Image (spheres, helix red, strand yellow):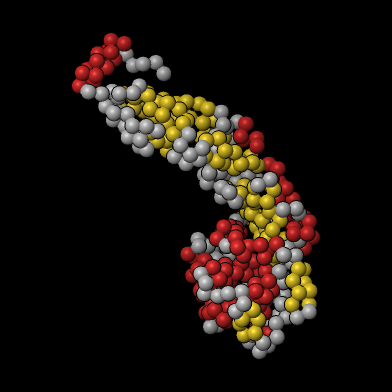
Amino acid sequence: MLAAALVAGLVAVGGAPVAAQTTDTLAQRAILIEHATGQVLLAKNADEAVPPASMSKMMLLYMLFEQLAEGKLTMEDTFPVSEKAWRMGGSKMFVLVNSRVSVHDLLRGIIVQSGNDACIVVAEALGGSEAAFAERMTERGRELGLTNSVFLNSTGWPEDGHVMSARDLATLATRIIQDFPQYYGIFGERSFTYANIPQPNRNPLLFRYPGTDGLKTGHTEQAGYGLVASAVRNGRRLILVATGMASEDARARETERLMDWGFREFGNYEFFKAGEIVAQAPVWLGNKPTVPLVVANGLTITMSRTARRQMTVKTIFDGPIPAAIRQGQQVATLRIEAPDMEPIQLPLVAGANVDRLGLFGRLGAAVNYLVWGAPAE
């Protein structure tokens, strides 16, 4: 058998691991992800488990969204306000003790105003106590793939051992966007008034970066200034987590710069549709001389524009491929290589059935092989 390879110019693959690029950033930890493909464009200390401040409120929000989506709650349901919730410090929605607040208002109090008091109201209503609900947050987070997250409270209030990684925050943001599109629009609301107190959304990119539609800020003295943000430009969505910055201004400027960098330096490229023929492979002792090699799923990749220009693609198989061949059977491999990217290998399957020749056909093919040798490739 002869090893066969076809070199092409451009290709792409969805969901394939691409080496994260390097750029200087003021953030102590950061990760930038292309939402459509899940590919990481930038990573810096992305798996370091550190205090997340109010960004951990996204875990509570995810669980509240689940209750709404499953029909266990409605936006009109109300929860009671305990003295603990009323007395809670930090950012507040300003709920009143012994009152009841609707889920509709609590969601906006958490998302727009980052209300610690609103978080405790929700945690106590759904978990019986804040501590019990925090345990459920950790358990649910593990189920979602948050491998470096432990929740000890519902708010992100400083507490030893309450930690998340930038990658976990990005994973959680991704799940919120894809699992709950019916509620995600709340993250883009620029202000909310409760108890006659208007408060603006704390996400700076909502006001300064076109296309931004979420998600959550965070700040404590220990954690520094952080932001989980998502923005859409020309049909592409990026998800950015950047934490550990020194000031509000640094957070706003750096996250804006990183978003610009991601949109400018990278692109999504689609070159093969699902089932499209990539190449033809010769067949040994088949009733057809060749079999089409097809990609089972569409191929899209996010990659730097520079790397795209230097990309090569090879189809690799031991050929000729012996008959019989069944449609959908893996018979070859597609290998994709580009600078600053780990090689990617994908299966190629037969695009048609190729039956084995009968006895006389096989004898004739064998004689031809002995006389003329293998066909030229």
Q: Residue at image x 21%, y 18%? A: 360
Q: Position of residue 90 (x, y in %)?
A: 72, 77
Q: Residue at image x 55%, y 83%? A: 129
Q: Position of residue 375 (x, y in %)?
A: 36, 16
- Residue 111 against residue 275 in the figure, above or below: below
Residue nearer the viewer, 191 or 369? 191
Q: Position of residue 312 (x, y in %)?
A: 54, 30
Name the image quarter holding residue 105.
bottom right
Name the image quarter holding residue 358.
top left
Residue 44 visible:
no
Q: Is residue 257 left or right of residue 374?
A: right
Q: Is residue 357 left or right of residue 45?
A: left
The N terminus lies in quadrant: top left
Q: Residue at image x 57%, y 68%? A: 65
Residue nearer the viewer, 105 or 225? 105
Q: Residue at image x 64%, y 50%? A: 237
Q: Is residue 350 left or right of residue 121?
A: left
